[in-house]
Amino acid sequence: TINNPVFLGFYTRFVRIEKPERLPWLQFWQAVEEFRVTPASNAANKLAYEIYRDYISDKAEHLVPMTPAQEKGLRAFFAKRLEGPLARTPVPSDIFAQAQADIFEELRLHTYDKFVGSSHFNGIVELKEREKEVPTIHHFYYL
């Protein structure tokens, strides 16, 4: 699964090589995962603002696809928080949940089937069959 760090490493490598235009989508998904599991704190807020800045704001270098309603809602949410008394209150851990789920579906539609048929994925399958277990990070010292 995508939560397995080895699988994610192979998948990221595949996307970087075969579908580089989709790499920001995967990076957004990963950033949201990191934010989602970070305890509410200044560090979590910093991650949330970085995600907003890098993938959602009108000045984002790598805009990710989302519905106009999602984009409008997230931009309004962060516009209120960037200044004023709300800036230090915790950003809800599920603020990006729907956008992340939609990006996951877009990745599945645009990259996953090709990944499953690739040599990148075949390496995972071969190791799983040989070792009788799903590969973990200890199988790959070079990652």
Image: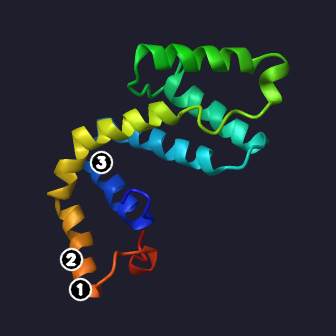
Q: At numbered mark 3, what does the secondary structure look like: helix, strand or loop?
A: helix
Cα gap from disc 2 to disc 1, whole angstroms = 6 Å
Quarter of the rendering containing residue 64: top left
Cα gap from disc 1 to disc 3, whole angstroms = 25 Å
**Front in this rendered view, residue 17 or 5:** 5
In the image, is residue 86 above or below residue 22?
above
Cα gap from disc 3 to disc 2, whole angstroms = 20 Å
Q: At numbered mark 1, what does the secondary structure look like: helix, strand or loop?
A: helix
Q: Which corner quadrant holds the N terminus?
A: bottom left
Name the residue at 40% across, 23% down.
66
Residue at the disc numbered 3: 15
Q: Position of residue 71 (x, y in %)?
A: 49, 18
Q: Position of residue 2 (x, y in %)?
A: 39, 56
Q: Which mark is residue 130?
A: 1
Q: Which mark is residue 47?
A: none
Q: Residues within 10 Å of mark 1 (few under 14, many from 20)?
A: few
